Image: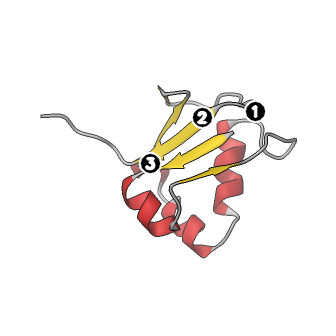
Amino acid sequence: MRILYFAWLKTKLGISEETVPCSEEIHDVDSLVGWIKSRGPQFQDAFIDMDVVRIAVNQEYVVSNISLKDGDEVAFFPPVTGG
């Protein structure tokens, strides 16, 4: 999976993207977020409040836990407002 981080998430983590294989440990959105949080203090801090983090899988906004597979693109970003 290709993982993308945008805006302040990118700044806090010091990375804009990475590649992570699906596995028994990482097989859906919730398990991916849990794995990310477990990677260290900066990851825990960036993902501490999931009310301010939005998720898109393959460029489609998701609001519930969905299954992931190799080749998926998962993006994490702050809420976006229009005007």
Looking at the rendered image, the disc whose residue lies closer to the viewer, 3 or 1, is 1
Query: Label 3 vs label 1: CA separation?
Result: 22 Å
- The residue lying at 73 percent from left, 47 percent from top is 20
Name the spot of residue 82 as percent of width and height, x first: 18, 34
Image coordinates of residue 44 in percent, x first then y, are 58, 66
Residue located beneath label 3 in the image: 53
Q: Is residue 64 above or below residue 12?
A: above
Residue 73 is marked as: 2
Q: Residue 9: horizontal and vertical position, in percent?
A: 45, 59
- Disc 2 residue type? Glu
The secondary structure type at the circle numbered 1 is loop
Q: Secondary structure at mark 3?
A: loop
Whether residue 64 sits left or right of residue 11 in the image: it is right
Three-letter amino acid code of the residue under disc 3: Val
Q: Residues within 10 Å of mark 1 (few under 14, many from 20)?
A: few
Quarter of the image that includes the C terminus: top left
Give the left or right position of residue 29, taking residue 52 as reference. Answer: right
Left or right of 83, for residue 80: right
Say which quadrant the N terminus sits in.
top right
Q: Which mark is in front, 2 or 3?
A: 2
Distance CA(mark 2)–CA(mark 3): 16 Å
For the view shown, which residue lies furthest in the bottom direction? 41
Q: Is residue 54 above or below residue 62?
A: below
Task: Residue at 66% x, 72% y: name it.
Answer: 40
- Which numbered disc covers residue 70? 1
What's under tag 1, amino acid-wise? Asp
Counting residues from the start of the chain, the first of labels 3 and 1 encountered is 3
